[in-house]
Amino acid sequence: MLGGSAHANKGDYDQAFSDYDKALEINPKYAEVYLNRGLLYYLIKGDYDKAISDFNKALEVNPKYDVAYYNRGAIYTIKGDYNRALSDYNKALEIDPKYAEVYYNRGVLYAQKGDYDRAITDYSKALEINSNDANSYINRGIAYARKGDYEKAISDYNKALEINSEFALAHFNKAIAYEKLGRKEEAIEAYKNVIQKGNPQEHAPLIEHAKGRIEELEQNKK
């Protein structure tokens, strides 16, 4: 198993698969190997069905394997099977009530379903456990914005930016929130930060939108 993990860490995924297969031939009750092979199928190969199969086997060996529930739930979320995803996240939290990543993922699931109150509750729980998670702040901010509470949204975007000042999406969402509140000058400054902080390739759509909004807002000031 150690060989498989070492090869995976080096990016030699074919050898990692081979090592995991051999380990399971020797010990077909090795839950961690099923998990690690499943993660390769999930994250590297994008083969969600094989990943789920391996997570299932890991859970057959160890029904209390919270990480397997978490990752299987993440795949079910991607596949749009929200009921199964929610069930897996709930089981993971029954095993480990301090699993911040599960609260975050479950919050994302609730947000995708339009249940912003529950999403906010889960993001808040994730932040109680890990207060240095910029993604939880920005997603909670988005949920507040969906509910029309733009002041709380801006507060969360600012907290995300305290953690990562280069977070272009936080600057962008903050600009939109300022616009919703009619605070045009602050919106312009936030859009300028999108342009300054954003990666020209990764954030090209945000940057172009920010440029257009700045131009329109500047014209409206005249």
Image (tube, rainbow, N blue to C red):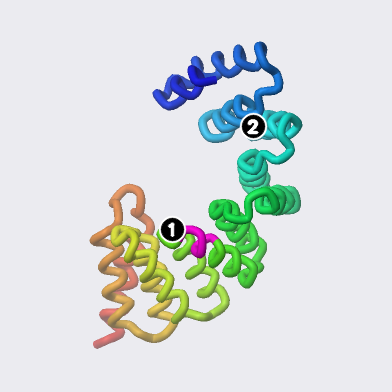
3D distance between C-alphas at marks 1 and 2: 27 Å
| Circle nearer the viewer, 1 or 2 | 1
Q: Magenta span covers which residues?
A: 126-130
Position of 32 relative to 2 (above/below): below
Was residue 143 drawn as part of the magenta stretch in this picture? no
Say which element carries label 2: helix
- Residue 93 against residue 75 in the figure, above or below: below
Give percent across and percent down for residue 9. Answer: 42, 27
Q: Looking at the figure, which quarter contains the N terminus?
A: top right
Q: Quadrant of residue 132?
A: bottom left
Q: Residue at x 51, y 80 (%)?
A: 149
Does residue 128 show up magenta in the picture? yes
Nearest the camera: 159 or 95?
A: 95
Q: Secondary structure at mark 1?
A: loop
Depth check: give the residue in front, 189 or 25: 25
Q: Principal SS element in the magenta part?
A: helix
Question: Residue 51 got which mark?
Answer: 2
Residue at horizontal 41%, vertical 75%? 154
Q: Residue at x 30, y 71 (%)?
A: 190
Q: Is residue 25 left or right of residue 189?
A: right
Q: Is residue 114 left or right of residue 214?
A: right
The three-letter code of the residue at mark 2 reads: Ala
Mark 1 highlights which residue? Answer: 133
- Disc 2 crowd rating (10 Å Cα; few below 14, some 14-19, many 20+) is many
Q: Quadrant of residue 121?
A: bottom right
Image spot of residue 61 (x, y percent): 73, 29
